[in-house]
Image: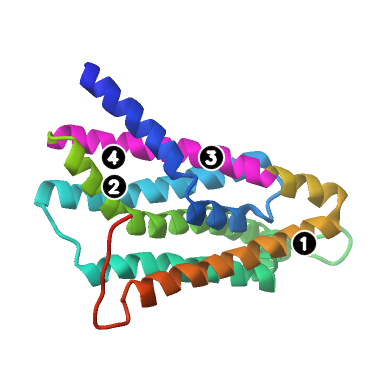
Amino acid sequence: MTSFALIASIGFLLGMRHATDADHVIAVSTIVSRERGLLKAGLIGALWGVGHTLTIFLVGIAIIVFKIAIPMRLGLSMEFSVGLMLILLGVLNLSGVLQRVMSKFGHSHVHRGSGADEAAVAEAQGGRRRSGIWSLARPLAVGIVHGLAGSAAIALLVMATIPEALYQIIYILIFGVGTIAGMMFITACIALPFAYTARRFSAWNHGMVYASGLLSVCFGLFVSYQTGIVGGLFTGHPHWMPQ
C-alpha cells in the first residue's frame, strides 16, 4: 500500500507538472484566447488532457506490455507533428478563421417578424450543435497529437523506475489524471485575462488574441526546425531522444 500511494502521488504531481510544458501551454492559450467563460475554458483543458492521456495510455501499454520499440524517424515525426499543429493553430487565430467558423455555426440570429420561418430556426439550432461539436473536438484532437509526442518518453521513464507492469500501467493512468487536473487549472487561468479584457477593453483583447497566435506560429516553427533539421528527420542522420 505504501508503494502504491507513493506511485500515485508521484504520478499525479508529475502529471500536473507535465501540463505546464511550453508547447502545451501555448497550444491551449491559442485555443482559449477567444473564449469568454472560465467554465468552458476549464472544459477545454479537461478535453485536452483526456486526448493526451488516451494516447499516452495506448502507446505506453504497447511499449510496456509488448516491448515495442518506436523507430527513430517515427518518434521524430510525432514531435514534428506538434510543431505543425502549433503553426496551424496560430495561423487560424491570426487569420480569424476560428472566429468566422464559430460565428457561422453558432451565432446565426433569427428575429421574429423579419420573415424567418421554421426552416431558418432549425438551421440556426443545427449550427449551434455543430459549433458545440467543433469546440469539443478541437482540444481533444490537439491533446491526442501532444500525447503522441510525449508518450514514448513517459513510458520509457516508467519502465526504468517501476519494475512491475501493473504498477507501470497504474502510474500512467494516474499521471494522466494529474495532467487533466493541471490543464484544467492552467486553461482557466489563461482564459481569465482574455475574458476580462473582452468585456471591457476590446482593443487589448484583440491584441492578446493575435499575440497568442503569433507566439504559437513562432514556437511551432522552432519545434519543426528542431525536429526536422537539428533532430535529422529530413536528413540522413536522424537522432532522437524522447523528452
Disc 3 to disc 2, C-alpha distance: 21 Å
Type of amino acid under label 4: Ile
| Upstream in sequence: badge 3 or badge 4 | 4
Which label sits on residue 154? 2
Residue at disc 2, secondary structure: helix
Location of mark 1 (residue): 207
| First reached walking from the N terminus: tag 3 or tag 2 | 2
The circle drawn on residue 184 is 3
Q: Using the rendered image of the protein, determine whether residue 40 is visible from the camera's viewpoint.
A: no
Residue range (magenta) = 165-191
Rendered residue at 55%/47% (across/down):
44
Could you say which disc has been placed on residue 24 in the image? none
User: Which quarter of the rendering shows the C terminus?
Assistant: bottom left
* Amino acid type indicated by mark 3: Met
Q: Amino acid at mark 2?
A: Ile
Query: How crowded is the residue under tag 3: few (<14 C-alpha within 10 Å), some, or many (20+)?
Result: many
Q: Which residue appears farthest toward the right when viewing the image?
A: 113
Q: CA distance from mark 1 to mark 4?
A: 39 Å
Specify the farthest residue to the top: 1
Query: For numbered disc 1, what is the local secondary structure?
Result: helix
User: Which numbered mark, 3 or 2, is in the foreground of this view?
Assistant: 2
The answer to whether marks 2 and 4 mark residues whose Cβ atoms lie closer than 8 Å is yes
Q: Main secondary structure of the magenta part?
A: helix
